[in-house]
Image: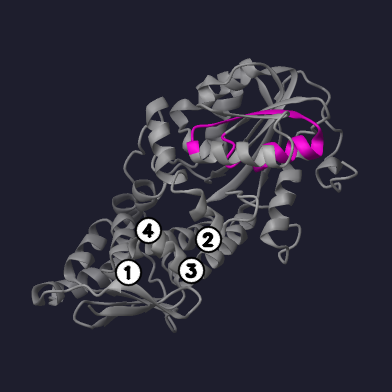
């Protein structure tokens, strides 16, 4: 069986799987196809991307040289794209019905970098309502993404398995150093003190919980509904000798019990959904002591919008990135005082670029674990994530808060940028 070479983000050829057996009818192109594609590209802001119809004919409406080429290998893929651009592009690329010539990140950035006509945005880029984040729905949604296997994530995450935005003191910092810097950054923002009790909602593979116990002398109860992640966190805590100070609990954040000095949540709010924000606020309210404070770190947006339709369906079911105004539904009903709000958008662009580079280095191993369709899907997801933060489609918010009458907050922000030792 023949295989077909393509181009991946580093520019080198790779094998994407069996060539599609296209019928004459599927590859035949009519004049209306050319007109529809040209009309769509103009309404989409004339991006500098060359498109090739199934019969080999090129359509280009941009100015100057194109940054790359999108090839529609059959007419069905073209028409699906014209009806549902977000969903059909991802599915077509995953299946091989759509190919990219050139750097994937740059082509996707060029495609999304131009302002679209409001009618095009409203008609074609409104995703379906995300899947519900009920107790059962959240468990199913999280299992779909996070329980793919620790061996898979170990290939391309940092050595502590952090799957959230890193903090780069300089753009040249390694991913490992930037993730350590992120953990110190959030700990300093809430001014952790030895002997305090911390509850963490959505703890990933446990790196932050272990870090807080080791470096800040606190005890941590960490909640997560991913079985794979909880098991890994327990193993790491025992290996690092902090299992007497870190308790990993396989349960939903809504079932948090006890009272604490600090509430931490890094990378969970995207999975909560705005319908549940008041309930999350109630959990925080009943959990925090009178001097309590906390931090929520989340992907967000500058205006309300659904997650990309393809990502919500195939990668992050139930995901929703909130605006800062929407996040206030967590804090305002319970009179929490927002102390600090920071946007680390460009730090996430750099984090995702590191992930994509490492993923590409291990693509053959990923293909053996899963298949080539999975490789293409996750390549597109990581490339699209890089682009979304570069072009401000997505933001990264860190919001620190405290009880409204708690006056023990630092007088300046100097503690946030102090060295870990001096802090």
Task: Give the distance between the C-alpha atoms of the residues marked 3 and 2, in whole angstroms.
Answer: 7 Å
Instruction: Tell me the crowding category of disc 4: few under 14, some 14 to 19, or many 20 or more residues within 10 angstroms, Cα based.
Output: few
Q: Nearer the viewer, residue 240 or 380?
A: 240
Find residue 284 and report its horizontal and vertical position in percent: 61, 22
Residue 290, placed above or below residue 89:
above
125 in magenta = no
Instruction: Tell me the crowding category of disc 2: few under 14, some 14 to 19, or many 20 or more residues within 10 angstroms, Cα based.
Output: many
Marks 4 and 3 in Cβ contact (< 8 Å): no
- Image-based side of 244 in relation to 105, left or right: right
Instruction: Name the residue tied to disc 4.
Output: 370
User: In which quadrant of the rendered view does residue 116 lie?
Assistant: bottom left
Instruction: Please report whichever mark, 1 or 2, sits nearer to the chain's N-terminal start.
Output: 1
Residue 31, placed above or below residue 171:
below
Question: Which contiguous range is marked in magenta?
Answer: 202-227
Marks 3 and 2 in Cβ contact (< 8 Å): yes
Residue 120, placed above or below residue 19:
above
Q: For residue 189, say whether it is visible.
A: no
Looking at the image, which residue is at 34% across and 60% down? 90
């Amino acid at each position: 069986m023949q295989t077909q070479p393509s181009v991946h983000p580093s520019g080198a050829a790779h094998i994407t799987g069996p060539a599609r057996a296209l019928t004459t009818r599927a590859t035949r192109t009519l004049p209306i196809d050319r007109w529809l594609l040209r009309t769509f590209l103009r309404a989409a802001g004339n991006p500098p991307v060359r498109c090739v119809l199934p019969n080999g004919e090129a359509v280009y409406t941009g100015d100057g040289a194109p940054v790359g080429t999108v090839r529609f290998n059959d007419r069905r893929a073209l028409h699906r794209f014209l009806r549902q651009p977000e969903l059909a592009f991802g599915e077509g690329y995953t299946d091989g019905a759509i190919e990219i010539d050139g750097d994937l990140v740059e082509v996707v950035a060029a495609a999304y970098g131009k302002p679209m006509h409001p009618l095009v945005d409203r008609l074609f880029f409104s995703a379906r309502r995300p899947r519900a984040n009920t107790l059962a729905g959240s468990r199913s949604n999280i299992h779909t993404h996070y329980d793919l296997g620790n061996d898979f994530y170990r290939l391309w995450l940092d050595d502590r398995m952090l799957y959230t935005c890193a903090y780069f003191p300089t753009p040249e910092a390694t991913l490992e150093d930037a993730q350590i810097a992120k953990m110190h950054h959030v700990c300093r923002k809430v001014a952790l003190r030895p002997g305090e009790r911390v509850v963490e909602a959505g703890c990933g593979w446990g790196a932050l919980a272990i870090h807080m116990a080791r470096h800040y002398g606190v005890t941590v109860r960490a909640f997560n509904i991913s079985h794979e992640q909880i098991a890994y966190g327990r193993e790491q805590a025992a290996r690092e000798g902090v299992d007497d100070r870190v308790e990993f609990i396989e349960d939903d954040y809504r079932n948090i019990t006890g009272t604490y000095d600090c509430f931490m949540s890094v990378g969970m709010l995207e999975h909560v959904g705005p319908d549940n924000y008041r309930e999350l606020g109630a959990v925080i309210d009943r959990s925090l002591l009178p001097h309590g404070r906390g931090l929520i770190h989340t992907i967000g947006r500058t205006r309300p919008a659904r997650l990309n339709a393809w990502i919500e369906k195939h990668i992050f079911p139930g995901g929703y990135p909130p605006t800062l105004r929407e996040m206030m539904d967590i804090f305002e009903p319970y009179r929490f005082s927002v102390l600090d709000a920071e946007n680390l958008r460009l730090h996430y662009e750099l984090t995702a670029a590191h992930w994509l580079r490492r993923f590409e280095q291990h693509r053959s191993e990923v293909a053996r674990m899963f298949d080539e369709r999975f490789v293409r899907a996750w390549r597109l997801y990581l490339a699209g994530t890089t682009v979304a933060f570069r072009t401000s489609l997505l933001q990264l918010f860190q919001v620190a808060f405290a009880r409204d009458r708690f006056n023990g907050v630092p007088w300046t922000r100097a503690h946030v940028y102090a060295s870990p030792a001096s802090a």
